[in-house]
Image (cartoon, rainbow, N blue to C red):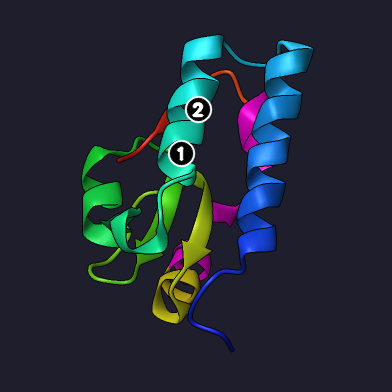
C-alpha cells in the first residue's frame, strides 16, 4: 500500500470541485475553500487526527477533510467522512466505529457538510 497520493488523484479531486461549482451543488465560498486547501503541496496539506474529529463531529454529520486523516485517537461517534488521504490505522478505526468513508461527490451533495482543517 502506498503512503502518498498521486498528482492525478489530486487533479481528480479538483475536477470534482470544479464540477460542483458549475452545477451549483455548493456555494462558491465553500468550494473555493476546499480547492485552496486541496491544491496545497503535500508537505503543507492539512493533517487531522481522529481525536480531533471525534471531539468536534456530531452524530450523523458529513465531514470533508482536504488533506490526510491520521489514526491518532479513537472515534466514539458515527459520522460520514471524505478526505484526500487516510492512514491505514485511521481507515481501520473509522470502519470499526461504524463511520462511513464516502467519496467527495457524496459529501458535496450533503447539505450539512463541514470542512475540517
Name the spot of residue 32 as percent of width and height, x first: 50, 23
In the image, 7 versus 46, the foreground residue is 7
Q: How many marks?
A: 2
Left or right for 41, reference 73: right
Where does the N terminus fall, quadrant-wise?
bottom right
Quarter of the view holding residue 9: bottom right
Disc sitting over residue 113 in the figure: 2
Left or right for 95, reference 12: left
Disc 2 packing (10 Å; few <14; some 14–19; many ≥20): some
Name the spot of residue 22 as percent of width and height, x first: 75, 15
Label pair 1/2, CB-CB below 8 angstroms? yes
Q: Is residue 51 above or below residue 81?
A: below
Name the secondary structure under disc 1.
strand
Residue positioned 69% across, 27% down in the render: 18
Disc 1 packing (10 Å; few <14; some 14–19; many ≥20): many
The magenta-colored residue range is 94-109
Instruction: Compare marks 1 and 2 and give the one earlier in the sequence.
Output: 1
Q: Is residue 102 in the magenta section? A: yes
Q: Is residue 30 above or below residue 79?
A: above
Q: Is residue 102 visible?
A: no
Majority secondary structure in the magenta region: helix
Residue positioned 59% across, 55% down in the render: 101
Residue positioned 27% across, 66% down in the render: 74
Residue positioned 24% across, 71% down in the render: 72
Q: Is residue 15 above or below residue 52?
A: above
Name the spot of residue 27 as percent of width and height, x first: 56, 10
Disc sitting over residue 63 in the figure: 1
Q: Is residue 68 in the magenta section? A: no
Q: Is residue 68 above or below residue 66?
A: below
Where does the C terminus fall, quadrant-wise?
top left
Amino acid at each position: 500500500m502506498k503512503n502518498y497520493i498521486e498528482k492525478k488523484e489530486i487533479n481528480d479531486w479538483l475536477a470534482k470541485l470544479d464540477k460542483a461549482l458549475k452545477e451549483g451543488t455548493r456555494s462558491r465560498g465553500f468550494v473555493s475553500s476546499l480547492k485552496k486547501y486541496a491544491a496545497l503541496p503535500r508537505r503543507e496539506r492539512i493533517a487531522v487526527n481522529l481525536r480531533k474529529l471525534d471531539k468536534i463531529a456530531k452524530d450523523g454529520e458529513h465531514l470533508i477533510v482536504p488533506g490526510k486523516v491520521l489514526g491518532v485517537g479513537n472515534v466514539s461517534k458515527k459520522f460520514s467522512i471524505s478526505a484526500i488521504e487516510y492512514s491505514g490505522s485511521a481507515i481501520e478505526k473509522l470502519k470499526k466505529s461504524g463511520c462511513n468513508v464516502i467519496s467527495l461527490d457524496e459529501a458535496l451533495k450533503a447539505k450539512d457538510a463541514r470542512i475540517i482543517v
